Image (spheres, rainbow, N blue to C red):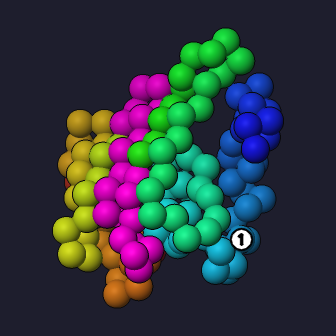
């Protein structure tokens, strides 16, 4: 698995990877909320029944380029997420409060509304509302 991720670090566009894998959403093997956040914010989602996720990716020089920590409920809904992309100097911190993920994205407040199945319905970030 690290070999595939290392390819991304060698200037293989991550966007191409995400574009190709976007059809996987219909497959129930990904947790929808984690998968959708990975598409929105550029990290790699994984398959399976995940309860906790701790990922640290290094480049070929051994420098950490991003880290991701997430916890999920038994039903597969995201409880917390912290994503630090050091390449972009970007950080996302989210905590679930009922059917809402609240937090900070690069020092701006972000709110993500979820439906009863924990799918993303809308996102408010930097004063703008996006509905899905």
Q: Is residue 76 visible?
A: yes
Compared to 14, does 102 lie above or below?
below
Question: Considering depth in this image, is 55 or 97 the residue closer to the camera?
Answer: 55
- Give 2 or 41, whichever is nearer the viewer: 2
Please rate how many residues cluster around mark 1, counting C-alpha atoms within 10 Å: few if below 14, some from 14 to 19, many from 20: few
Residue depicted at x 69% and y 65%: 22
Residue 87 appears left or right of 28: left
Which quadrant would residue 57 be assigned to in this image? top right
Can you say which quadrant of the picture contains the C terminus?
bottom left
Outermost residue toward the bottom in this view: 116
Viewer can see residue 131: no
> Considering only vertical position in the picture, is 74 above or below 20?
below
Left or right placement of residue 43 versus residue 2 in this view: left
**Quick check: 83 left or right of 98?**
right
Q: What residue lies at 21% left-to-right and 75% top-to-bottom?
A: 98
Q: In percent of the image, x 41 and y 80: which residue is there?
A: 75
Q: Where is residue 114 in the image (x, y as percent from the top left)?
A: 34, 76
Q: What element carries label 1?
A: helix
94 to 129, vertically: above or below: above
Q: Which residue is drawn at 30% across and 46% down?
A: 93
Residue 20 location (% of width, % of height): 77, 59
Q: How many tags in the picture? A: 1
Q: Where the N terminus falls, by quadrant?
A: top right
Q: Where does the image place residue 123, in percent across and percent down from the top left?
A: 33, 64
> Does the magenta portion include 98?
no
Numbered range of the magenta stretch: 70-91
| Residue lying farthest to the top in this orientation | 61
**In the image: residue 87, left or right of residue 82:** right
- Residue 42 position within the rendered picture, expressed as x and y whole percent measured from the top left: 56, 46
Q: State the residue position of label 1.
A: 24
Residue 74 covered by magenta stretch: yes
């Amino acid at each position: 698995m690290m070999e595939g991720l290392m390819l991304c670090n060698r200037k293989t566009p991550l966007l191409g990877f995400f574009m190709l894998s976007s059809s996987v959403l219909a497959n129930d093997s990904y947790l929808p909320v984690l998968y959708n956040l990975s598409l929105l914010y550029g990290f790699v989602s994984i398959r399976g029944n995940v309860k906790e996720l701790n990922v640290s990716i290094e480049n070929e020089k051994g420098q950490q380029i991003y880290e991701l920590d997430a916890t999920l409920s038994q039903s597969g809904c995201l409880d917390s997420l912290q994503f630090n992309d050091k390449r972009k100097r970007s950080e996302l911190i989210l905590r679930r409060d009922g059917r809402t993920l609240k937090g900070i994205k690069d020092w701006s407040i972000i709110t993500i509304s979820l439906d009863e199945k924990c799918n993303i319905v809308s996102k408010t970030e930097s004063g703008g509302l996006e509905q899905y």
